[in-house]
Amino acid sequence: MDNTTQNVAELFIQYLNEENFDQAEKCLDSDFKFTGVLGHRESAATYIDDMKKMKFKYEVLKTFISGEDICMWYHIDMGKKTLLASGWYHIIEGKIHSFKVLFDPRPLLSD
C-alpha cells in the first residue's frame, strides 16, 4: 500500500465502497477519532462496525491536499438519501488518525 496522504484516503473510500471493511479498518490508526454532524466515534473498530451496518457509498467530486490533511467533497449515498458532504482526513504515518465530516442533516431528519 502506498502510504501517501492521498492514497490512504482514496483507498479507504474505495474499501468502504467495496464493503471491504477489514481493509478499510487497516487504513485507520489505532487512536482513530471520527466527528460527524450526528455523532462521534472513538475507535477504528466502533467506526467500522457502524459502516458495516450503514454501507454508505461515496462518489468523490473533488479532493484537496495540504501536507498530512486531505479534504474530499463527495456525494454519500445513504440508501434512501444521497447527500453532498465534505470529509476532512488527517493522516499520520500512513494511517487515518482523524476524520471529520460535514453535511446538511435536514434531509435525514425530515422523514
Image (tube, rainbow, N blue to C red):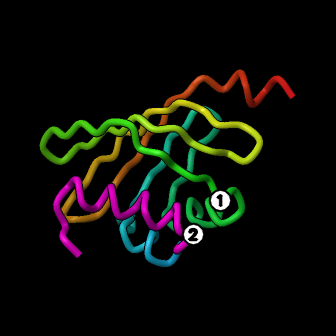
Q: Are marks 2 and 1 in contact (CB under 8 Å)?
A: yes
How many numbered circles does the render carry?
2
Q: What stretch is highlighted in magenta?
A: 1-20
Instruction: Kindly identify which residue carries mark 2.
Output: 19
**Of callouts 2 and 1, which one flags the residue occurring earlier in the amino acid sequence?**
2
- Most common secondary structure along the magenta stretch: helix
* Residue 96 x/y as whole percent: 33, 58
54 horizontally vs 58: left or right: right
| Residue ID at (44%, 76%) | 23
Crowding near the residue tagged with mark 1, few <14, some 14–19, many ≥20 C-alpha atoms within 10 Å:
some
| Residue ID at (73%, 25%) | 107
40 up-or-down from 21: above or below:
above
Instruction: Kindly identify which residue carries mark 1.
Output: 55
Q: Is mark 2 on a helix, strand or loop?
A: loop
Look at the image and tell me in which quarter the N terminus lies: bottom left
Please give the label number shown on residue 8.
none
15 is within the stretch colored magenta = yes
Amino acid, disc 2: Glu
89 horizontally vs 17: left or right: left
| Residue ID at (69%, 56%) | 54
* Residue 87 x/y as whole percent: 42, 39
Question: What is the residue that sits farthest to the left in this orientation?
Answer: 67
* Residue 91 x/y as whole percent: 25, 54
Amino acid, disc 1: Lys
* Residue 10 x/y as whole percent: 33, 57
Q: Is mark 1 on a helix, strand or loop?
A: loop
24 up-or-down from 102: above or below:
below
Look at the image and tell me in which quarter the C terminus lies: top right
Crowding near the residue tagged with mark 2, few <14, some 14–19, many ≥20 C-alpha atoms within 10 Å:
some
Instruction: Identify which residue, 108 or 26, lies in the foreground.
Output: 108
